[in-house]
Image (cartoon, rainbow, N blue to C red):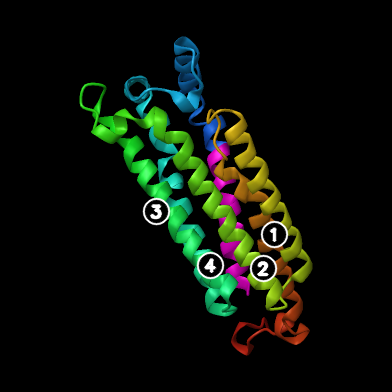
Amino acid sequence: MKQTGHAFIAMAAVWFAYLVIAFTLAADYQEALVEAAEDLGVSDNKLPAEAIAQVFEQHTAGSLVGLPILFAAPAIMLMTAFAVRKHWPSAFATWSVRTAVVSAAIWWAYLLIDSGSYLGPDNLPPLTRDIDVLTVPLVAAASAFALVSVIAAAEGLRKAGVVRRAARIASALAAFLLVAGLAGTFTSGFEDPLPPIALFPSSLILGIALLRSARKEQPPAARLFIPVGQRED
């Protein structure tokens, strides 16, 4: 239980860490993207690949600093879904794994397509040239499947009788963010995608609840026990 709790905490932490980096180490890069979008009269999610490539050239370090986190996020989500299925197998847990796999595949595909912009404005791969059209649907789809995975995992925990109250809250919150986020995507005319940061609250709730539950289940004697070899004289 403790390992699964840590996995959910890691799911939340990875997106919090990315936000911190975006507003600190990558602040100039993010500002350059916004300025490029304003110059072209489009949203920053609709920037053409040529403009993105130019920003990458001017702010290479800023664009790369958060990339490892973006690639790692789906792996952490998969690890979490597999942990839930391993410890509390159910149909819900199986669907959590399946939707996590779909989400990870979409997200990694998007990152690889977007990374083609590092080749420069004159050497863009075919799919990268359509990044202005692909960004919103790919990000929204990856985020949606990830939220479904969290909902399924929460329902699997609730069905197994584990952290029922927290699982119910996390599931309802993720469902609300899923519906609201997709509604926002459609009503904006596909200008703004459902963001992956929507995973943060439900993942954090489940992680904290599992860690607290694991702490309560540990016998007091086990928590206070000190191996003989480690006792101080």
- 180 or 165, nearer to the observer: 180
- 171 or 121, nearer to the observer: 171
Query: Label 1 crowding class (10 Å Cα cut-off): few <14, some 14-19, many 20+?
Result: many
Q: Which mark is residue 105?
A: 3
Q: Residue type at mark 1: give it.
A: Ser
- 182 or 112, nearer to the observer: 182
Find residue 188 and report its image quarter: top right
Q: Are marks 1 and 4 in contact (CB under 8 Å)?
A: no
For marks 1 and 2, the one nearer the N-term is 2
Q: Residue type at mark 2: give it.
A: Glu
For marks 1 and 3, the one nearer the N-term is 3
Q: Are marks 2 and 4 in contact (CB under 8 Å)?
A: no
Q: Which mark is residue 95?
A: 4
State which region is magenta.
1-19
Q: Residue type at mark 4: give it.
A: Trp
Marks 1 and 3, Cα distance to the nearest angstrom? Answer: 23 Å
For marks 2 and 4, the one nearer the N-term is 4
Q: Main secondary structure of the magenta part?
A: helix
**Residue displayed at 62% across by 72% down:** 2
Q: Which mark is residue 171?
A: 1
**x and y percentages locating residue 90 in the rendered image:** 58, 77
